[in-house]
Amino acid sequence: MYKNKNFSAYLLLVFAFTSLQAFSQNFTKQDSLRGSITPERVWWDLTHYHLDITVDPNEKTIAGSNTIQYKVVKKGQKTLQVDLQPPLQMTKAIQNGKELDIVHDGNAHFIHLKEKQKLGKIYSVQVFYEGKPKVARRPPWDGGITWKKDANGLPFVASSCQGLGASVWWPCKDHMYDEVDSMKISVNVPKNLMNVSNGRLIKVEEKENETKTYHWNVVNPINNYGVNINIGDYVHFGEKYKGENGELDMDYYVLRDNLDKAKEQFKDATRTMEAFEHWFGPYPFYEDSYKLVEAPYLGMEHQSSVTYGNGYRNGYRGSDLSRTGWGMKFDFIIVHESGHEWFANNITNIDIADMWIHESFTAYSENLFLDYFYGKKASAEYVIGTRRSIANDRPIIGQYDVNHEGSGDMYYKGANMLHTIRQLIADDAKWRSILRGLNKDFYHQTVNTQQIENYISEKSGIDFSAVFDQYLRTTDIPELRYKKDGNTFAFRWKNSAATFDMPVRVAINGEFEWIAPTTNWQTKKMKNIVSTVELDPNFYVTLKEGK
């Protein structure tokens, strides 16, 4: 369905941004076909997928079909764009028993329907495909399918496709704006292996050819890159978590040899659920359960099927990204990837250019986890410590309509922007209500940046537009310039937009107070001679004496 309530406004926004950005970088036709809401996409609304495939780990192949069910929302159209990336091949498409003509154009495949598509009616088309999918070179960042062996020589296989797109391993409408309402995933694998996907396992079929088919059912809307397969010699354990919306099934699938380690390390899963339900509201997918699944790469936020490959140790691969010590208090992958269940899977960006909505809030969730269990000081030290990872190389927001991500600074620059906004609101109860409100008011929706900006400004009663512009759309970090002359303290913003007027806390002679700089010099008379000026480190700005 069209998850965004302001879809027409979004299209106008995209057009404006795309027009401005067209001259700044060269993009191909394939970029546009992948990243834009084309005429062959916009007229039909996804309602259900049934992905039915056989995975052969020995031959490293996938073959099968995806039955795409959709509702006609615009009349007069008869061509579907379905995406599938080479070297996989789309072999045929069938509707009501009739094979359809397909025009192949790189990753995009245009299926020409024979029947009239009536407005408001539900139809389905079954798309068949086969081949050797792209091998993931550096998952999850450069994804595809990872084909590995476990310590016992058995196949260990998984998908990862954020950014690259789900069409790297299965045919789908590969654009974030339209999430399918529900999905069935049927995966046939060798008999000695198990497949774990999203949602709940509803049936296991034993076949005569020494294989099994695992049938998984997802009843909530799901984005394409959140769909996954995980194939291995898994063993299962689980627990019931008493959460805000009742009893939540928490299931864990790990390689056989790692069961004892997992039973200890995965204690962070319920701790994570406790902290995030406090800050963000109820886990958004109770009906589909929560799973942690061991994977042959670091991990990713697959909806209700979070993948884990952090080596059963705390920190990020055993190290603290903040270098404060606080990062070793939790398993980074369990906390970070589970945070995406709220920001990425519940609230999903329409266009990947706005991926900061996923990554900034989720990077920020790491210090909220610390806040919940270890206190505000610990959480502040952690997020401030992550600033060393910020490059300020290019804007956090990418270019619209061409499947273009912004800077990797969307993680920790974005987290520090949100931490700064928390200071400006200066009311933790209100800040928590805003975070919970986002997940309630945009529940199971796709959104754009402007909606998130407007929501935070409206609910806080503070216009944060200049703050968002500064941190999301430029690479400049505001610099608080000051001069002291006797008991006179002068200050202004530099390295910022002309309209930037963010208040900030400074300690003058050791006493903290709020000031409201603009880009013009202001002066303040102090009771005593100004000897020292310090910045509250919770604000992501810099301080410098002079002009």
Image: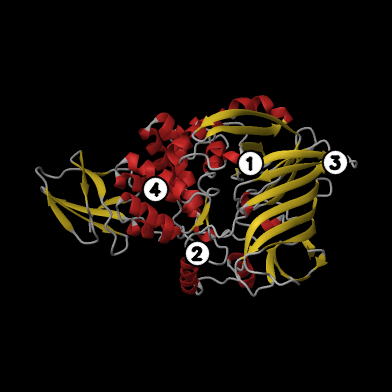
Depth order, front residue of 487/238: 238
Q: Is residue 84 above or below residue 503?
A: below
Q: Position of residue 418 (x, y in %)?
A: 39, 48
Amino acid, disc 4: Leu
**Count of residue discs:** 4
Q: Position of residue 370 (x, y in %)?
A: 44, 34
**Foreground disc of the pair 4, 3:** 3
Alpha carbon of mark 1 to alpha carbon of mark 4: how far?
27 Å
Q: Is 425 placed left or right of 490 in the picture? A: right
Going from N to C along the chain, the mark reached first, 2 or 4, is 2
**Foreground disc of the pair 1, 4:** 1
Q: Is 105 placed left or right of 444 in the picture? A: right
Going from N to C along the chain, the mark reached first, 2 or 3, is 2
Q: Which mark is residue 7?
A: 2
Q: Considering the image in quadrants, where does the C terminus appear?
A: bottom left
**Foreground disc of the pair 2, 3:** 2
The residue that mark 4 highlights is 418
Q: Which mark is residue 211?
A: 3
Q: Is residue 290 visible from the viewing direction of this image?
A: yes
